Image: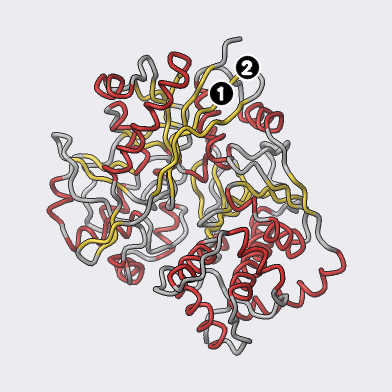
Amino acid sequence: MKAKVYLGIDLGAESGRVIAGVWDGKKIKLEELHRFANGPVYIADSMRWDVLKLWSEIQTGLSAAAKRFGSAVVSVGTDTWGVDFVLLSKHDEILGLPYHYRDSRTRGALERAFKKVPRAEIFAQTGIQFMELNSLYQLIALYEHAPELLETADCLLFMPDFFHWCLCGSRAAEFTIASTSQFLHPTRRNWSYALLKKFRLPTHFLPKLVPPGTELGALRESVASQTGLKGAKVIAPPSHDTAAAVAGVPTTNTGKTNWAYLSSGTWSLMGVEAPKANLSKRALELNFTNEGGVNHTYRLLKNIMGLWLVQQCRRAFDVRGAKYDYAQLVRLAAKAPALRSLVNPDDPSFFNPPDMPAAIQAFCRKTGQPVPQTEGELVRCALESLALKYRMVLLYLQELTGNRIDVIHIVGGGSQNDLLNQFAATACERPVLAGPVEATALGNVLVQAMASGEIGSLAELRQVVRKSFDVREFEPEQKLIPTWRAAYERFVKICAPAG
């Protein structure tokens, strides 16, 4: 069989890639064609995304794909982070620079929203956890700040949907990315028009919804001509990067809830794959979320601040003249004292502080703990705290599903961090299977292959991942479990709300 190539455009908060999935009929091989930096642009006291620069980089990657693979390229699809969006006018003009989810304009938006619609009602209408960065609160803030933009807008496209529009002119919202918005109904699987009406927000710009695996159309002639990529079609993968990563988890237990996934990167997203949304009172109390998955599944999960803490520590160290790569920081952390200082990774003070090490130190000082001083102590504090947060979320998942979780699959860039993997295994008292690193790209390209008829089911897709990539196993260190249990008791108290 002649190899077929599926292109994945994978955009993250720090970088983007164009990746080729080379399919020989049995196994998939990934080849990175173009990598580029991404990050916020600061302008007029706001944080924005430079989508034109990203589109330029994507075209560079597509040109590389055309030169490398030519007519073997079958399709292309995009995945990105959630919640952020671009507005288009009736005549396809981009209305304003899209905001970054960490922009300060949504500060206090939750409290303002709850004055209009009770928290429980919002959850019943959406099934989504409450975070100020959600699209709902971005819309509310935008309508307060610049209502003329929403009134002029003819179409709202989430980030991957926008790049699909760039590719082929499609004006559609893929289901998994739309589900991050907090204005998609969790059982009707359509927009929560009634909820938006209660907030007096316009809805005329909401596009049609399509499931992952939908063929959106052929490449625009201008894109095909400019890149040399002729004959390729655009297929919507699971367009939320976590949905793509979960599709790429190499589990043998598709359809069961006795395994958990942990997509580890800037954010840690930990959950189970469920057949329907969990809208229970307890899920609301615990602030869990129900986001869309492949094959009509839902991802019952918790957002955890993730390796953002380490990334921002590294950035601060760099500013001070101490330049480390992540491997060096992990080695320093491994040598630092164990379980000495802990933080709640999801404390608001860590969302976007000007100086992450200072924020960690301030938290430890405030909670009466030893204050980490060295780079190794700071990073170890962050990693151990993440592992304990994973234990907390694991216990909550077992409570919500009524099932024991036997194994944790850690995928994504963070799965390369062996120290964190081992901490997670011991803290959670569960084996951890780490890898593949490229689960998001795999989920993206393999769903395209499934849509093209090359793969028959989600279980078969995951079998392809197992055949194509190795995973590494981390067992709990039995002699250290009592120490981690004692640390967890401290951690729970640290995470408890004041008063």
- Look at the image and tell me in which quarter the N terminus lies: top right
Q: Residue furthest top?
A: 1
Q: Residue at x 54, y 43 (%)?
A: 298
Residue 159: x percent and y percent? Answer: 35, 43
Q: What residue type is labelled 1?
A: Val
Q: Which residue is drawn at 63% across and 77% down?
A: 342
Q: What residue type is labelled 2?
A: Gly
Q: How far is disc 1 from disc 2 in space, using C-alphas?
A: 9 Å
Circle 1 SS class:
strand
> Eyeballing the image, is 207 above or below 28?
below
User: Count the marks: how many?
Assistant: 2
Of the residues tagged 1 and 2, which is closer to the observer?
1
Residue 140 location, quadrant: bottom left
Q: Which residue is drawn at 62% across and 58% down?
A: 327
User: Do residues under tags 1 and 2 come within 8 Å of each other at their CB atoms?
Assistant: no
Residue 277: x percent and y percent? Answer: 53, 47
Q: How is the image coloured?
A: secondary structure
The label shown at residue 462 is none
Q: Which residue is drawn at 30% across and 58% down?
A: 138
Q: Residue furthest right?
A: 479
Residue that mark 2 sits on: 25
Residue 220 location, quadrant: top left
Residue that mark 1 sits on: 22
Residue 250: x percent and y percent? Answer: 68, 37
Residue 263: x percent and y percent? Answer: 58, 50
Q: Residues within 10 Å of mark 1 (few under 14, many from 20)?
A: many
Circle 2 SS class:
loop
**Left or right of residue 424: residue 230:** left
> Eyeballing the image, is 270 above or below 338?
above
**Left or right of residue 411: residue 444:** left
